[in-house]
Image (cartoon, rainbow, N blue to C red):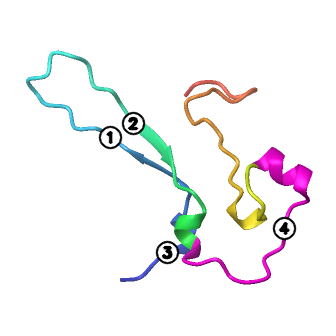
Amino acid sequence: MKSNPKTFTKVKSYVPYHSPCDPCPPIGRKYYSTPPNLYLGFQPPNLPQFSPIEALKRGTLWPVFYDFYENPYKKRAGKEHE
């Protein structure tokens, strides 16, 4: 199996199944974020660390485990809805 590095993203999406007999309208595309620790495998020794104050702000001591969450449902400023 060949992996294409251009298609890698931490934000994944899926479309929930909608039955033809379902009276409700389809939900549409749902998004979820995968954490960086899924792709690291193990924690190598001597990783760089945030300062204690910065670690409290970011929620982790190590920069490789930090993941900024961007809400995919929220409109971005300056972009129109397509």
Residue 23 spot, x, y in % from top left: 15, 15
Which is more N-terminal, label 4 or label 2? 2
Q: Please, what secondary structure does the residue beneath circle 2 have?
A: loop
CA gap between label 3 and label 4 equals: 30 Å
Query: Which residue is situated farthest in the top direction here?
Result: 23
Residue 49's disc number:
4
Residue 15's disc number:
1
Which is more N-terminal, label 3 or label 2? 3
What residue do we see at 57% from left, 68% from top? 6
Give the amino acid type for the residue marked by disc 2 in the picture. Answer: Arg
Identify residue for label 2: 29
Magenta-tinted stretch: 40-58
CA gap between label 2 and label 4 equals: 37 Å
Is 53 in front, or is 74? 53
Q: Please, what secondary structure does the residue beneath circle 1 have?
A: loop
The total of numbered circles placed on residues is 4
Residue 65 spot, x, y in % from top left: 68, 62
CA gap between label 2 and label 1 equals: 5 Å
**In this rendering, position of residue 80 left or right of residue 62:** left
Q: Please, what secondary structure does the residue beneath circle 3 have?
A: loop
Give the amino acid type for the residue marked by disc 1 in the picture. Answer: Val
Callout 4 crowding tier (Cα within 10 Å): few <14, some 14–19, many ≥20: few
Residue 33 spot, x, y in % from top left: 53, 49
Is the residue under label 4 in contact with that under label 3 (CB below 8 Å)?
Answer: no
